[in-house]
């Protein structure tokens, strides 16, 4: 990110459909260009369409080279002198405008950005970064046609379009990013892109980020190794899937994992994993996929996100059938009681709720920094409960004043210890030992996974 230092006060009359602004908390390295330069880009766009209509251009490099040559040709034809620097930045901007996603290209290059938000024409874009929260961007769209064009370019690879007749689009892009877009009359032109993190956070990174402490992670590692079933619940964007991904570092890489989802989000390194994605348009429900998974001899089953009655029933069909050693899911709820009540409203019987071994509550919260005089956002595991003797009891809860988890004794650990042939002391010693090991293992996901698998299961993970 670099600040644009030059100020432009003249209002441009030539409209590309997007523009660079003088102000913004997040500065894009895109220079503002003159009306003459914008007019040149519009001419190049027209010539490029004509050229690509009559001959095949095979690669992105070919596209960029073609656009650069067209700029040089057009400038020469008009008797306009372009120096090397001007040719380069005009080629870059023209490529973004003609073939790319306008200024959104630059935002997609920044791996620290978790979410990109367009909220209408002539309004600055916004990005969400983990370290800084929401920041305004020094760029905006200037007409609805440009917003529509960018959305359709993004969705082209999956055969989807947004139009005035169908002004809403919700899709998963080929790279895993989640795209939501809408046009009038639903909105003034809106795009929301939630980024898919290619490399998940490791348990060590979540501890380093203060999402959770090593003792809780050690406790959960024992549950993930055992036959326990775990639900991760929390509010929107609290990091539920992030935590579930991290917890799969503790599942033996030799296990067969079946992932059933409506929205592909789970990203685990297990070689013997299979993803099944529901498709409403084809009449393939999550529940249908869960039934299919019963015939696949799974060791572990993940049932995506529980949002309605059908998905809740799908999860409990898995739990009650006992086809897998462990079953896992995420859902929206801000406490264990709320999670259990929501499941009851989805038609789950009280007795069936006992099949859930553990519920982890993770929240996205606002904290106030007195020194900086600003709010900042944090994600924390605030509650861990377990089911023993047909009762869900709290094992750990977050103390907001002390900023730490307070622990109670765990009956579930004792039960797991019994199944492993360990005494109460031995399972508690195991918890202490794992806490120390989690602190020492490498921070990155693959290295943490490799180290844990080798140390606890004697398994060698070879990255492909």
Image (spheres, helix red, strand yellow):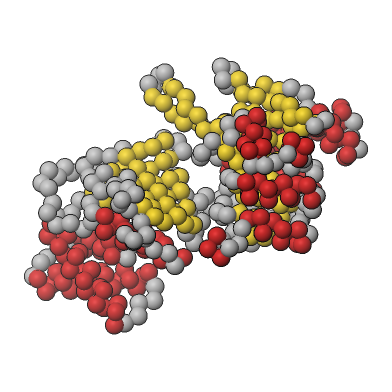
Residue occupying the point 52% across, 33% down? 364
Residue 3 place in picture, x, y as percent: 27, 42
Residue occupying the point 35% across, 38% down? 135
Answer with left or right where residue 452 lies relative to residue 339.
right
Residue 131 place in picture, x, y as percent: 45, 36
Depth check, front residue: 322 or 47? 322
Q: Is residue 281 above or below residue 386?
A: below
Answer with left or right where residue 292 lies relative to residue 89.
right
Residue occupying the point 77% across, 23% down? 409
Work out which quarter of the rendered image holds the N terminus and state it: top left
Q: Is residue 288 visible?
A: yes
The answer to which image quadrant residue 389 occupies is: top right
Residue occupying the point 55% across, 54% down? 263
The answer to which image quadrant residue 346 occupies is: top right
Work out which quarter of the rendered image holds the C terminus and state it: bottom right
Depth check, front residue: 389 or 13? 389
Depth check, front residue: 448 or 96? 96
Depth check, front residue: 279 or 260? 279
Q: Is residue 428 above or below residue 173?
A: above
The answer to which image quadrant residue 306 occupies is: top right
Residue 445 place in picture, x, y as percent: 61, 47
Q: Is residue 223 visible?
A: no
Residue 398 place in picture, x, y as percent: 62, 24
């Amino acid at each position: 990110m670099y600040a644009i230092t030059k100020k432009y006060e003249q209002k441009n009359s030539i409209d590309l459909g997007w523009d660079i602004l003088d102000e913004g908390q997040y500065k894009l390295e895109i220079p503002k260009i003159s009306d003459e330069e914008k007019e040149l880009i519009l001419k190049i766009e027209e010539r490029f369409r004509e050229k690509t209509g009559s001959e095949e251009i095979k690669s992105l490099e070919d596209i960029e080279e073609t656009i650069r040559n067209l700029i040089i040709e057009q400038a020469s034809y008009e008797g306009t002198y372009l120096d090397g620097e001007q040719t380069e930045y005009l080629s870059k901007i023209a490529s973004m405008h003609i073939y790319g996603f306008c200024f959104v290209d630059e935002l997609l290059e920044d791996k620290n950005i978790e979410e990109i938000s367009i909220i209408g024409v002539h309004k600055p874009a916004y990005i969400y970064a983990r370290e800084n929260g929401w920041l305004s961007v020094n760029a905006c769209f200037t007409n609805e046609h440009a917003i529509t064009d960018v959305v359709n370019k993004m969705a082209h690879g999956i055969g989807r379009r947004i139009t005035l007749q169908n002004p809403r689009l919700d899709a998963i892009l080929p790279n895993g990013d989640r795209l939501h877009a809408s046009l009038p009359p639903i909105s003034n032109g809106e795009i929301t892109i939630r980024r898919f993190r290619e490399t998940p956070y490791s348990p060590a990174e979540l501890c380093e980020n203060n999402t959770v402490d090593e003792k809780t992670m050690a406790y959960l590692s024992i549950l993930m190794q055992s036959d326990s079933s775990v639900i991760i619940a929390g509010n929107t964007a609290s990091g539920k899937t992030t935590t579930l991904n991290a917890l799969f570092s503790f599942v033996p890489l030799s296990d067969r994992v079946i992932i059933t989802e409506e929205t592909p989000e789970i990203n685990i390194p297990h070689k013997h994993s299979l993803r099944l994605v529901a498709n409403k348009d084809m009449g393939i429900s999550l529940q249908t996929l869960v039934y299919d998974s019963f015939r696949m001899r799974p060791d572990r089953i993940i049932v995506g996100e529980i949002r309605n009655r059908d998905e809740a029933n799908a999860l409990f069909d898995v739990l009650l059938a006992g086809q897998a050693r462990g079953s896992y899911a995420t859902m929206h709820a801000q406490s264990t009681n709320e999670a259990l009540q929501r499941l009851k409203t989805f038609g789950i019987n009280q007795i069936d709720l006992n099949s859930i071994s553990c519920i982890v509550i993770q929240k996205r919260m606002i904290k106030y920094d007195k020194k900086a005089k600003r709010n900042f956002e944090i994600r924390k595991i605030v509650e861990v409960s377990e089911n023993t003797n047909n009762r869900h009891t709290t094992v750990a809860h977050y103390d907001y004043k002390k900023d730490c988890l307070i622990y109670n004794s765990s009956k579930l650990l004792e039960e797991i210890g019994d199944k492993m042939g360990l005494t109460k002391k031995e399972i508690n010693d195991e918890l202490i030992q794992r806490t120390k090991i989690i602190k020492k293992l490498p921070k990155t996901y693959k290295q943490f996974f490799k180290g844990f698998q080798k140390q606890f299961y004697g398994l060698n993970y070879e990255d492909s």
